Amino acid sequence: MPIILVRHGETLLNAARVMQPFDTALSPRGLEQARLVAQRLAWHQPAAILTSDMPRAWQTAQAIADTTGLAPTICERLRERNFGDLRGHPHDSFGFDPLTMHAAPPNGESIPEFHSRTISAFALAVKIRSTLDGPLVVVSHGLVIDAILKLCTDVDIQILPERIGNTAITVLEPRHPHTPQLVNCAIHLTVKGLEEDASSLSGG
């Protein structure tokens, strides 16, 4: 039974390409995306939900909970990378790409700090999955899922997508080397024309 990674639904700031504060919530479009991914995940009959506590992830996890009857468990280590004082500002206003900056922004996390936290979060997910009789759903963020794929699995880097889409699911084998069975699939959004906006931010 796999570990299923899910990125949160769309937010207004995703669509506006703004670096998101902690408390950013889902937009109406994002809530509908969350409802659709919840319907898809119910088919997998998950045994547990582990989620970031950021509102956009929590709301996505709650939609899955409403469909499956499971109570989400919070894991703060699944939070998006902390961009500190850059949050709340347009991504394209900096003259550089803050999503790839190695150093820590003021009051934020460096890439090594973020990667260490992400590896720890995934180790916890693997441990929890080993105690279950069904799949574990992990609700998190674009940069977190991208880092898990690159740091914790044997994925072929050449086939990785440039971005992780809103409510896209990634299915991993529960045991090392956690080979991906499916990466960044959001086919559930095509049912009602809610495809992910490829121009929005995936991370931050």
Image (tube, rainbow, N blue to C red):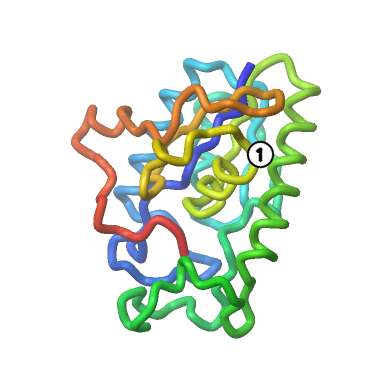
The residue indicated by pointer 1 is: 50
Vertical comparison of 171 with 149: above or below: above
Vertical position of residue 176 compared to residue 122: above or below:
above
Task: Say which residue appears at 78% left-offset and 23% top-offset.
Answer: 130
Residue 156 percent location from the top left of the image = 48, 34
Q: Residue furthest left?
A: 193
Q: Residue drawn at (34%, 33%), measured in percent from left and top?
A: 186
Asked if residue 71 lies left or right of residue 123, the reply is left
51 in relation to 143, above or below:
above
Disc 1 element: strand
Residue 178 found in image quarter: top right
Q: Nearer the viewer, residue 5 or 182?
A: 182
The reply, left or right, for residue 29 in relation to residue 114 is: left
Q: Position of residue 110 (x, y in %)?
A: 63, 71
Give the tally of numbered discs: 1
Q: Residue at x 67, y 64 (%)?
A: 112
In the rendering, at what x and y percent does residue 118 appear? Answer: 66, 52
Q: Nearer the viewer, residue 96 or 44?
A: 96
Q: Position of residue 152 (x, y in %)?
A: 65, 40
Dot 1, crowdedness within 10 Å: few (<14), some or many (≥20)? many
Q: Quadrant of residue 138?
A: top right
Three-letter code, disc 1 = Leu
Residue visible at 65% across and 57% down?
115
Quarter of the image where the N terminus is located? top right
